[in-house]
Amino acid sequence: MGSSEYVARPLNRTAKIYVAGHRGLVGSAIWRKLESEGFTNIIGRTSAELDLKDRGAVFEFFASEKPNYVVLAAAKVGGILANNTFPADFLSENMQIQVNTMDAALEHNVERLLFLGSSCIYPKMAPQPLKEEYLLTGQLEPTNDAYAIAKIAGILQIQSIRRQHGKAWISAMPTNLYGPGDNFSPMGSHVMPALIRRYDEAVQNGATTVVNWGSGTPLREFLHVDDMASACLFLLEHYDGPEHVNVGVGSDVTIKELSETVAQAVGYEGSMEWDASKPDGTHRKLMDVSKLTAAGWTAKIGLHEGIQQTVDWFRNNRESFRG
Ligand code: GFB
């Protein structure tokens, strides 16, 4: 980040802010964060109320609501198997959501917009930790290349709108996220909610063996979604540059270590097996978060604490969790 990109420009707490995807893991956390920070005019629409793939409806929504700020946290997301099985959906739906929302936001003069991507935008074989500048320097991980290309297009759309229209719009790329409100679908979810649900069911059923996916050797970095929400507001108020910014904790664990930690948090004492017919995905994608750290933000929620809190949330929301 060049020094001119560090700007302390508080958002107006009474201005209208639209959180696209406010029912999702990230959007709901951002909504909670904005409320706790005193924002009084937050708006959201469920996908039933507003389908962001419907270009006409999106333009009508912006014309009538005229938000000052937008957090674009709406996306079709899923774990490794969902990405690998439905690449056409991940590419098409994410492209439509992003293009429609950003085009309508531009037409209706949205002052600040934050676009959210993912660490899978980086080349599979890029050096670790992943610096922002490694974008577009090599081949992507094939299990999620379609999703990654959509997110890379979003970064380019932000940069192009900045160049052509001078907007103070920015992008953030989070590492793997987890926390309350996640999707716990056994086949479609990411690894953290999958493990929490699997081990919890094993405890309830008295099972002594669980089967996880892949080899357990890949490394992943996990960021609690409340930390992510805090980073999003921080960036909106302190960063104004064309380059996307990594958001993570700066350290990772193997999937085997993660599964042991989740087992402990859930109270599962049986054994674990690994199903090699399921994909491992990329071996490692640790974020270099030095830019964000230099700007003054670091994650606060430790992995053990975050996992325990998410397990407790899951157990308190058995009737209503997604998935
Ligand atoms: O969380 P996950 O699906 O995301 O998988 P990715 C991470 C690792 O956990 C992989 C292993 O090596 C999986 O094989 N794993 C073990 C499991 N057991 C399970 C399980 O029960 N469910 C799941 N899902 N994984 C996604 C990308 O990649 O992450 C997206 O496909 C996106 O594009 C997202 O970037 C954050 O980190 O492999």
Image: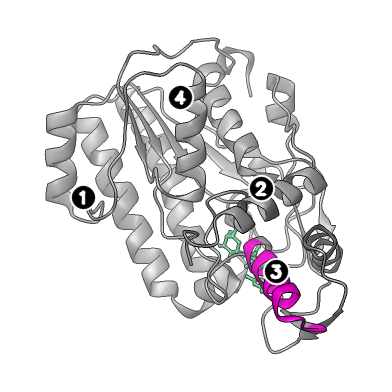
Q: Is residue 83 visible?
A: yes
Q: Which residues are magenta?
A: 193-209
Residue behind mark 3: 200
Q: What is the magenta segment's predominant secondary structure?
A: helix
> Upstream in the sequence, badge 1 or badge 4?
4
Q: Residue 49 has which mark?
A: 1
Q: Residue at x 52, y 39 (%)?
A: 29
Please identify the quarter of the rendering in which residue 186 is found: bottom right
Q: Position of residue 167 (x, y in %)?
A: 35, 23
> Upstream in the sequence, badge 3 or badge 1?
1
| Residue 279 relative to residue 16: left or right | right
| Amino acid type, mark 4 | Glu
Q: Residue at x 19, y 31 (%)?
A: 107
| Amino acid type, mark 3 | Asp
Q: Position of residue 296 (x, y in %)?
A: 71, 19
Residue behind mark 4: 35
| Amino acid type, mark 1 | Glu
| Amino acid type, mark 2 | Tyr
Q: Position of residue 177 (x, y in %)?
A: 62, 50
Please identify the quarter of the rendering in which residue 18 is found: top left
Tell me: residue 201, above or below residue 114. below
**Residue 208: in magenta span:** yes
Residue behind mark 2: 134
